[in-house]
Image (spheres, grey):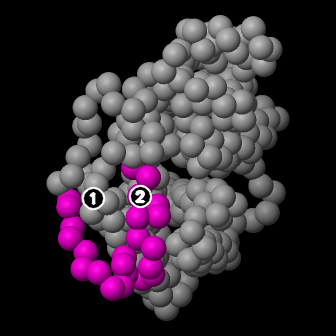
Amino acid sequence: MVNQRLVSILALLGCFFAFGVIALGAYTRLVDAGLGCPDWPGCYGHLSVPMSETAKQLATLRFPNSHLEIYKAWAEMIHRYFVGGLSLFLLSIVGFIFINKTVRSRGNVLFAIGLIALLLYQIMLGRWTVTLKLMPIIVTQHLLGGFLIISTLWLIYLNNKTTTKPIEKTTPVATIKLLPWAIIALFMVLAQISLGAWTSTNYASLSCLDFPFCNNEQELHFQFKEAFKLFSPLGINYEGGVLSNAARQTIQMVHRLGALVVSLYFLILMAICFTQFKLSTKLMKSLYVILGLLIIQLCIGMANIIFKLPLFSAMSHNLVAVLLLLSVLTFTFQLANTNSGIRVASTASSTRGKT
């Protein structure tokens, strides 16, 4: 029990750490510092940003096609330092799970293996982000990798969290019927986050200056083939974006449409939950959190367009997306656990009846 509680605490701390790394990554991307250091893992051949005049001259000789901007280089390197610290922290959590038999449950082992796989792939994506000069499909995967890592840490936290409070019962019909809805909601949020990442990595966030339509006084010509061409040519510097304005506007409008579809789905899901089923207080609280975060996210998204993507608002849009994903994940996990508990209780009752 003590080790299980320790795993939950470590996972929760890891979530805060990963949340900070995601925030730093968003800042680095939004200030166009993704290529602040043209090499990896160092910066202009150094472990730190070259600051002396000699080091700056040497950096210019080594990388004649790159211009050293100190604040961008530091933004990139600080992000990398935090990623390195997070990687070590994740390895310690995984090591603790495998070493201690008391917490080496099937769920923990699967989450630990997933965490290692995500971490290794994320490190590779971090390298490719620089070497492939911000290729959209790579950067998009890199952003999603951060979301998946914090989601896995959150699952480890939920799986090992212990409580002394009695769990209120939810009707079996509710859990059985709502779980597929929750799983669909989870995948819809992930899809919308992917669209947001694709919008950001293709520099399409300000391609439509009006709301709710793109350019109210102009006809929009959608370019779906160009907008969602996943595999781009190698050797091109994608900083600033290379797509046509029509393709970027297409991406932006699809992202907005996705937000509308997700919002409507959640409203329908919550209406069903509130009117058709008797849910526990814990599940109702999760729904209220989801609804609150969804409203905040929609408001931030509109503010990004109206106020032309201010840095704080743009970063908040990324971070609230993380919280929304974790809240939906929590609701789905709670439903799955309740459903599992019902099945176990049903099996036990059946066994006693036969005896």
- Quick one: which residue is furthest to the bottom in this view? 275
Instruction: Residue at 53%, 24% (x, y): give it.
Output: 66
Choose top left, top right, bottom left or bottom right for residue 137: top left
Determine which residue is flagged by label 2.
Answer: 204
CB atoms of marks 1 and 2 within 8 Å:
yes
Q: 41 left or right of 262?
A: right
Q: Residues within 10 Å of mark 1 (few under 14, many from 20)?
A: many
Q: Is residue 81 above or below residue 307?
A: above
Magenta segment boundaries in residue numbering: 202-224
Q: 299 above or below 250?
A: below
Q: Is residue 69 above or below residue 308?
A: above
Figure check: 199 above or below 253: above
Badge 2 amino acid: Ala
The image shows residue 220 at horizontal and vertical percentages of 25, 75
Looking at the image, which is closer to me, 206 or 252? 206
Helix, strand or loop status at disc 2: loop
Q: How many marks?
A: 2
Q: Residue at x 67, y 11 (%)?
A: 57
Q: Secondary structure at mark 1?
A: helix
Q: Mark 1 — residue?
A: 247
Give the quarter of the image for residue 212. Answer: bottom left
Residue at (56% x, 9% y) in the render: 62
Residue 338 visible, this angle: no
Q: With 225 as the anchor, is 163 left or right in this view? A: right
Mark 1: amino acid: Ala
